[in-house]
Image (spheres, grey):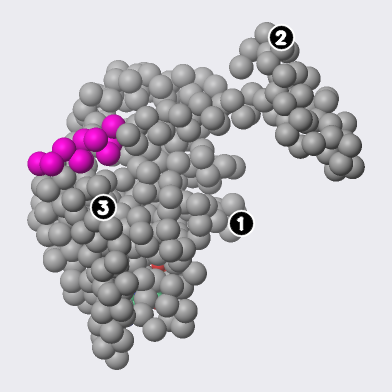
Amino acid sequence: MRKRLSVVEYTKGILSGDRVVLSRAITVIESKLDSDKVLAKQILREILPFSGNSIRIGITGVPGVGKSTFIETFGKHLTSLGKRVAVLTIDPSSKRSGGSILGDKTRMETLSNDSLAYIRPSAARLSLGGVADNTRETMLLCEAAGFEVIIIETVGVGQSEILVHGMTDFFLLLMLAGAGDELQGIKKGIIEMADVLVINKADGANQNIAEEAMGTYRNALHLSPKSASGHITQVVTASGLEGKGIPELWNMISDYQKLTSDNGYFIRNRQSQNLDWMHERIRQALESAFYENSVIKRSIPEIEKLVREETELPVVAAERLLALFLTKKSEEPI
Ligand code: GDP
């Protein structure tokens, strides 16, 4: 294990925008060592007052939709405006590939060499909840290090979009036109979460069908109720490859930031995200305390057997186990 710095050294380094120290602090946050967990909390407590000053943008879409190309072009546009951009990735499939596919060095090569940009793939963790915690905390560190735009990228393959939506201010869904199934396996709920649907790869021969798809989605969304933010979900076309539609998208996001700051939604949404994060953490902790409790571990096979055999109702069985947990909890502190 590489030598750790002191809390003061991490804090100073992060606040001065030192990306080597920032990366090392993120490594501490991602570590499973108990000593690092203590250190991570100390660092986070120090930098918390300097965090939050950014727009957090979630970007999702199925593999192949053009996320990395799009983020590279979008990120370059932002750095050309003098903005400091951090790109964090949540990759729930990384366990399968034995390493983060989003960590592939060839992704976003130009952007990663830009002095105003910082790219960090999330380390593979056993649970999506763990990845989400790391990403949220990493985001805070990046903000304290002066990054004004935080992009959180996720592969559109399920649960992860909901997590990313729950930790960002603006949610961008990349889509393809004419890819067979209109919804490309993207769940309806995900479309409803989006602040903007971007029909990507609207270039060359694809341009026309992209525009047609835009019309179709606009009509479909016309029926959706107005969101609590006061922003109406937009449908646009873009080409990450050619850069088309990228400046307009950034203008839209800036307008969104202004609108929601003025009407109070921006801060309210972040407050409720923080509360959700806390409650989620409580649920996780309770669940692991329950399943790791030795009394529960011993009792569960027998009670499961009763439920399988329909000798015991699942609800009654659950209550029995919970009662056991609650009476035995003093032996094993949570
Ligand atoms: P990701 O898997 O969503 O990150 O997608 P990539 O950015 O890796 O792109 C997948 C493929 O689509 C690559 O072959 C890209 O060259 C291509 N691609 C990405 N963006 C565009 C675009 O805007 N237009 C066109 N025509 N191709 C694109």
- On residue 187, the disc is none
The picture places residue 61, in percent across and down from the top left corner, at 40, 64
Marks 1 and 3, the one that precedes in the sequence: 1
For the residue labelled by badge 1, is the local secondary structure a helix, a strand or a loop?
helix
Alpha-carbon neighbours of circle 1 within 10 Å: few (<14), some, or many (≥20)? Answer: few
Residue sitting at 19 percent across and 54 percent down?
Answer: 231
Pointer 2 residue: 331
Marks 2 and 3, the one that precedes in the sequence: 3
Alpha-carbon neighbours of circle 2 within 10 Å: few (<14), some, or many (≥20)? Answer: few
Relative height, residue 172 to residue 36 (above, below): below
Marks 1 and 2, the one that precedes in the sequence: 1
Comparing labels 1 and 3, the label whose residue is closer to the camera: 3
Relative height, residue 93 to residue 290 (above, below): below
**What kind of secondary structure does the magenta stretch mostly adopt?**
helix
- The answer as to whether callout 3 falls within 8 Å of ligand 1 is no
For the residue labelled by badge 3, is the local secondary structure a helix, a strand or a loop?
loop
Pointer 1 residue: 96
Residue sitting at 76 percent across and 30 percent down?
Answer: 316
Q: Amino acid at mark 1?
A: Arg
For the residue labelled by badge 2, is the local secondary structure a helix, a strand or a loop?
loop
Q: Is residue 264 one of those drawn in magenta?
A: yes
Pointer 3 residue: 227
Instruction: Give the magenta part as a residue range.
Output: 262-271
Q: CA distance from mark 2 to mark 3?
A: 48 Å
Q: Are circles 1 and 2 on residues that touch, CB within 8 Å?
A: no
Residue sitting at 72 percent across and 26 percent down?
Answer: 319
Q: Quadrant of ligand 1?
A: bottom left
Residue sitting at 13 percent across and 41 percent down?
Answer: 263
Relative height, residue 236 to residue 129 (above, below): below
Q: Nearer the viewer, residue 203 or 109?
A: 203
Q: Amino acid at mark 3?
A: Ser
